[in-house]
Image (tube, rainbow, N blue to C red):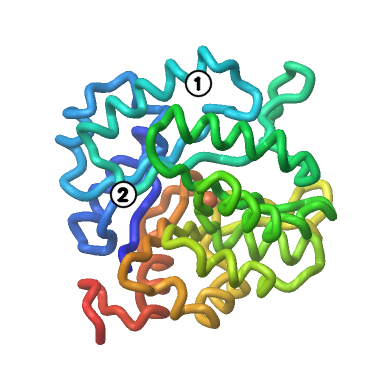
Amino acid sequence: MRIGFNFTSAEGLPIAKRLLADNLIDYCEILIDNFLHLDPKDIRNHFDCPIAFHIMRSCFLESSDKYLSDIAERIKYHARELNPIYVSDHLAEFSINGRLLHFISEIDYRKRMVIFNKIARWQEMLECQLFLENYPSLLDGGYEAPHFFSEMRHKTGAGLLFDISNAVCAAHNCEYSSDLWIEEALSTSHYHIAGYGPAISDDNLFLDTHAEEISPLTMQFFLENRDIFTRDNATVTYERDRNLDYESIARDIVKIKSACDLNAEGSPQ
Ligand SMILES: [Fe+2]
């Protein structure tokens, strides 16, 4: 198992570099859209470690073929130089009737065939297996998400980027057991984990904030399913892009390592 850190903007560069220098992480997951204007060799110069790609704003369910093919060419150009561990994207709605949403919104899982076709098309353009992240569901439809991902994998060949804390949020918000995700968690080797917080409008709802330390509920789910998340080829990316406090981030990563029975150097105890 490898532990990584998500690198989303220049602000996080000192944190990512320090985590690497302190041997707390093994790779960086780069929010690749933010860096497509750079020469990939310059990215490589900053990161002497394996790299994974996380795409944020392809908006592939809504974008034109022309836009997607342009961005796919640039992602593939960077992939040839950086050889990412995986290429992942978000399965979400970014706009309604042409108006951009402030927060990305959950898809309607009932529109599965239309969505599967778009996933297959986007994956074909990227010329690699695409891993799509589960959403921290707010609505009742979130109950259908595990089944949707299972069908998606079989119909399109795309994989799941299983966000552990998003599954915990969804289970809490939609009032089901996060165990509904176990089979899907087993289907993949790529995981996210992060903190979440209550919504301002309703503190009974959990939102994926990437601003806090990992919650006890998430750690409990991680520990209960440690055998899944610590398999040899597993990657667990720790996400934090707000409250970028090094000590707090390092504390969380050490918490994950301890849960995996790994010492700070990443070797079995
Ligand atoms: Fe995530």
- The label on residue 111 is none
**Is residue 93 shown left or right of residue 33?**
right
Relative vertical location of residue 18 with respect to residue 75 in this rendering, above or below: below
Q: Amino acid at mark 1?
A: Leu
Residue 258 in the image: x percent, y percent? 37, 79
Q: Which of marks 2 and 1 precedes in the sequence? A: 1
Q: Is residue 8 above or below residue 28?
A: above
Between residues 200 and 71, which one lies in front from this camera angle? 71
Q: What separation in Å lies between label 1 and label 2 (alpha carbons)?
A: 21 Å
Q: Is mark 1 within 8 Å of ligand 1?
A: no
Q: Is residue 179 left or right of residue 82?
A: right
Classify mark 2: helix, strand or loop. loop
Residue 85: give its label: 2
Residue for badge 1 = 68
Count of marks placed on residues = 2
Image coordinates of residue 20 in percent, x first then y, are 22, 55
Q: Residue furthest front?
A: 155
Tell me the kind of residue under disc 2: Ile
Which of these two is toward me, 133 or 117?
117
**Badge 2 density bin: few <14, some 14–19, many ≥20, Cα 10 Å:** some
Q: Secondary structure at mark 1?
A: helix
In this view of the protein, which residue sits in the foreground, 130 or 53? 130
Looking at the rendered image, the quarter that the N terminus falls into is bottom left
Q: Splitting the image into 4 quarters, where does residue 45 fall?
A: top left
Kindly identify the residue that appears in the image at 17 percent across and 29 percent down.
Answer: 41
Residue 71 location in percent, x, y? 43, 21
Q: Nearer the viewer, residue 197 or 146?
A: 146
Quarter of the picture containing the C terminus is: bottom left
Q: For label 1, count other residues whose C-alpha is less than 10 Å away and answer few (under 14), some (14-19) or many (20+).
A: some
Task: Identify the residue at image location x=75%, y=66%.
Answer: 172
- Vertical side of 114 occupied by 21: above or below: below
Q: Determine the residue positioned at 74% across, 18% down.
A: 99
